[in-house]
Image (spheres, rainbow, N blue to C red):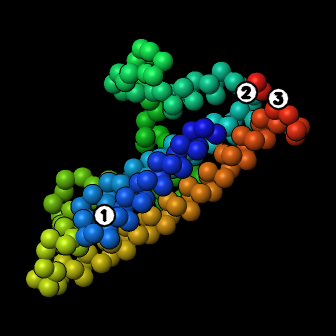
Amino acid sequence: MLFGRNAVVVVDQLLDNTGLLWSQGRMVGVSGLIRFALEYWAALHYAKRTLLDLTKDGDIEKAAERCSRLLTGSRTPIALYWGGTTVLPSVNVLTMIDKLNEAHSGARGVYEYLCEASHPSFVQNLHFIIASRTYDKHQFEEIKKVSVDVLERTVSAVEFIAKGFAGDGADIFRIGSEMLTNGHEEPIYPT
């Protein structure tokens, strides 16, 4: 639940920054921020699946290992607040995207689009460059026609992410609350 709360803070900032850049005509970084929001939704969904699996199989060791990899895993050493560095490998983002896609059809396609839109591919980035405040869009009428579709697809991606993230976020808080209380007024797990 704490991860879910922090994910809400992160995604709120990512989408807020997306709106800020868009409103200022600074389009080149927009797709990267949206992609990061989708990756956070995939991580939140992975956490939700971990809780659901725990409620079904009761395998606390499996759930603890998955949570540890999600929360403190890394491919490179990162300093931990309580001392030392990370030791577990992180969950691969494509693993989380594929799990998300199982529940939310189209998530993998949106992710692939956002990857292309945020990688240094001149053709893909050109749409965002043309949409930015830097260029006189009247010089690029043919490109502009195609760029409108790219920008609409980007807005659709944000809508897809926001709706799915909100649903999975609500689920993780509901499931976590039920696990903590197990139908009782007092938590069954130490807090």
The residue lying furthest to the left in this view is 139
Can residue 117 be seen in this snapshot? yes
**Is disc 3 surrounded by few (<14), some (14 to 19) or many (20+) residues within 10 Å?**
few
Q: Residue beneath label 3, please? A: 188
Amino acid found under the numbered disc labelled 2? Thr
In the image, taking residue 179 as reference, residue 22 lies left or right, namely: left
Q: Which residue is mark 2?
A: 191
In primary-sequence order, the first of circles 1 and 3 is 1
Secondary structure category for the residue under label 3: loop
In this view, the residue farthest toward the right is 184
Q: Residue furthest top?
A: 84
**SS for dot 1:** helix
The circle on residue 21 is 1
Do the numbered discs 3 and 2 sit on residues whose CB atoms are within 8 Å? no
State the image coordinates of residue 35 (x, y, percent, origin top left). Answer: 38, 53
**Quick one: 175 or 146, which is closer to the camera?**
175
Spatial separation of the CA atoms under disc 1 and disc 3: 46 Å
